[in-house]
Amino acid sequence: MIDRDELGAWLRLLETPLVGRESARKLLAAFGSPQAVIEAATDARRALVGANAATALATCPDDVAARVDATLAWLAADAAEPRAIVTLGDPHYPAALLASADPPLLLYAQGRLDLLQADSIAVVGSRNPTPQGHDNAHAFSSHLSHAGFTIVSGLALGVDAAAHGGGLEGAASTIAVVGTGLDRVYPRRNLSLAHRIAAKGLIVSEYSLGTPPLPANFPLRNRIIAGLTRGTLVVEAALQSGSLITARLAVEAGRDVFAIPGSIHSPLARGCHALLKQGAKLVETAQDILEELQLTGAGTSAVAATEAASPTQAQADEADPLLDALGFDPVTLDALVARTGLPASELNVRLLGLELEGQVARLPGHLFQRTAARG
C-alpha cells in the first residue's frame, strides 16, 4: 500500500493550484518521483514549468496532512471490496490506458482491480434516453459482458446506468469512471448501483477524496473511459453531448467507434448519425461488435499488446529508431506515424516511456520533441 510520504507528495504534485497535468508529467519525467519533485530546488522546477507553478510547489498546503490521514483511513477501511491507489508505474495500472494520449498519473480504485487489465468496451449515451435506447444499452452491455468484454461507462443517469446494469449480469462485469472523489456518489439516484458496482465490478477516479461533482471534471473523465477500452459504443446522443466527446477521444486514441442508428426524426439519433457519417461502424446487434473486434484481434489482452510493443532492455541500450524519427524539431503524432510506419497506439506507448525517461518532451498542441538530455 502507498505510504504516507509518497501519498503526501502525490497530493501536492497533482492538486497544487497552477500545476496542471502537463506540468506534473514534465516534473515527473525530469525528477522520477513525486517526492523528488517536491524536494527539488525551486529553480530546478522553474526551468521546467515556469515560476508560478515552481513556487506554488514550494509551500505545503495546511490541509495536506489531514487529507493524507483521511485517504489512508479510506484505504485501510474494513470494506468488502478492495481499495487502492494505482500510480502510473504500478503493475496494476491499465495497459490500455497507458497507450492513450493523456493517461492520468494516479487513479483511486474500489472493487475488482483485475478489471483494469480486462478487454473492455465503453457504452455511453444520453442521460435521458428513449425507452428503446435504455433497453438497447442494457441488452448490448449484458451480451458483451457475457462474451467476455468488461463494460465501461460514467455512472450517469440514463444510458450509463443501463450499461452498468447490463454489464453486471455477465462475468466480465463493469467499470464506472466517475468525476468525483470515491467517497461520494453522483448522481445520488445511482447510489444503490454504485454499491453494486463496487461489490462486483470496479469504480475508478483520478480525483481525490472529497472532490465534489464539479462540471469541468466530467468531460475530463471521458478521456479515461475512451482510453481504457477497445472501442466505444454510442447508443443515443444529441449532436452536442458528452458522448460525442468520448467518441472523439476514442478515435484520437486509435480505438473503434460504434453507433446504433435511429429514427431520422429523433433528436437523440442525430449524434449517432453524425458519427456514422464520420466513419463510425453501424451496429444493430452486439454480435456486430464482437465480429468486428475479432477481426482486429479480440482476445489479445492489452497487457500482452503493450509488452509486445515495449522495447527490451537490450533494445533500449541500442540506438532507438523512434528517437531518430523524432529528430530535434517539434513533430506531431501523425507525422511520426508516417515516418515510422508504426500505429498511433504503439507510438503513444513508446513516447510515454521516452518521456518518463527524460528523452522526449510533450509540447502544447499535441507536439513531441526530442531532448538533448540523453541519447
Image (tube, rainbow, N blue to C red):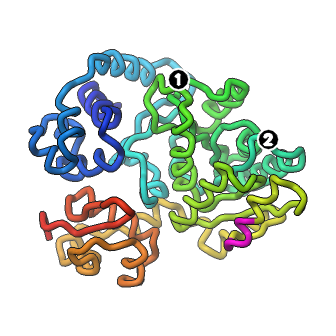
Count the labels in the image.
Answer: 2
User: The N terminus appears in which quarter of the rendering?
Assistant: top left
Q: Residue at x 75, y 53 (%)?
A: 238
Q: Nearer the viewer, residue 53 or 44?
A: 53
The x, y position of residue 319, in whole percent, is 19, 78
- Residue type at the position of mark 2: Asn
Above or below: residue 213 compared with residue 33: above
- Residue type at the position of mark 1: Asp
| Viewer can see residue 111 | no
Q: Nearer the viewer, residue 81 or 357?
A: 357
The x, y position of residue 169, in whole percent, is 76, 42
The x, y position of residue 159, in whole percent, is 75, 44
Above or below: residue 114 compared with residue 272: above
Q: Residues within 10 Å of mark 1 (few under 14, many from 20)?
A: few
Q: Is residue 121 magenta?
A: no
- Quadrant of residue 309 within the rendered picture: bottom left
Left or right? Give the position of 234 relative to 248: right
Left or right? Give the position of 65 relative to 257: left
Q: Which residue is mark 1?
A: 183
Per the model, the C-alpha gap separating discs 2 and 1 is 26 Å
Q: Nearer the viewer, residue 220 or 121?
A: 220
Q: Residue at x 73, y 65 (%)?
A: 274
| Viewer can see residue 297 | yes
User: The C terminus appears in which quarter of the rendering?
Assistant: bottom left
Residues rendered magenta in the picture: 274-279
Q: Residue at x 44, y 33 (%)?
A: 84
The x, y position of residue 374, in whole percent, is 13, 66
Which label sits on residue 43?
Answer: none
| Main secondary-structure element of the magenta-colored stretch | helix
Q: Which residue is mark 2?
A: 128
Q: Is residue 276 magenta?
A: yes
Above or below: residue 315 compared with residue 162: below
